[in-house]
Amino acid sequence: MQIRSKLNRAKLFLSYDALKGFKERIHEKERIVVNKPILSEDQLYELDWKIKQIKVGMMVSIVYYDNNQFVYKEGIVTGTDFEYKKEIRIVDKYIKINSILVINII
């Protein structure tokens, strides 16, 4: 029983963050800032062709550029707007088409 009481006592302090925001700053330091790559005409053509194949309900994986970093997102397409906002929605995340670098239909 003594081990169990020590574990319960340790749980009390798990949520305590002595240095508020310290973890966020550490994660920010780990992030590598990169410039958005420029795609060739062939890459743009292939990307455009793949985007036009996408329909709501399809499973896709996307690598896109956001906030000076590459982000990988995988999920079901829940919405598309190719005319006005020019974005794809995967589950609850809106992704601008001009920020997409790689897209694969799964």
Image: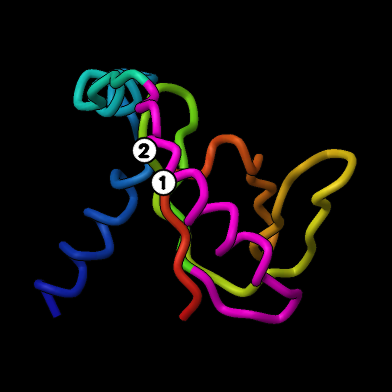
> Of callouts 2 and 1, which one flags the residue occurring earlier in the amino acid sequence?
1
> Which one is closest to the eye, mark 2 or mark 1?
1
Q: Nearer the viewer, residue 25 or 79?
A: 79
Which residue lies at the image location 38% right of the left edge and 35% below the top edge? 40
**Mark 1 nearby-residue class (10 Å; few <14, some 14–19, many ≥20):** few
Seen in the picture, residue 106 relative to 12 is either above or below; the reply is below
Which residue lies at the image location 36% right of the left edge and 38% below the top edge? 70
Quarter occupied by residue 26: top left
Amino acid type for the residue under numbered disc 1 = Asp
Q: Is residue 37 located in the magenta-colored stretch of the structure?
A: yes
How far across and how far down the image is residue 14, in percent? 30, 47
Q: Nearer the viewer, residue 55 or 7?
A: 55
Seen in the picture, residue 55 relative to 13 is either above or below; the reply is below
Badge 1 marks a residue whose secondary structure is: helix
How far across and how far down the image is residue 21, in percent? 38, 20
Inter-mark Cα distance, 2 to 1? 21 Å
Seen in the picture, residue 64 relative to 21 is either above or below; the reply is below
Return the residue found at the far right.
Answer: 84
Quarter occupied by residue 37: top left
Left or right: 11, with 47 as reference point: left
Amino acid type for the residue under numbered disc 2 = Phe
Which residue lies at the image location 41% right of the left edge and 46% below the top edge? 42
- The disc placed on residue 42 is 1
Q: Is residue 45 located in the magenta-colored stretch of the structure?
A: yes
**Mark 2 nearby-residue class (10 Å; few <14, some 14–19, many ≥20):** some
The stretch of residues the image draws in magenta is 36-60
Badge 2 marks a residue whose secondary structure is: strand
How far across and how far down the image is residue 24, in percent? 35, 25
Seen in the picture, residue 79 relative to 97 is either above or below; the reply is below
Return the residue found at the far front.
Answer: 42
Residue tagged by mark 2?
Answer: 70
How far across and how far down the image is residue 72, in percent? 40, 53
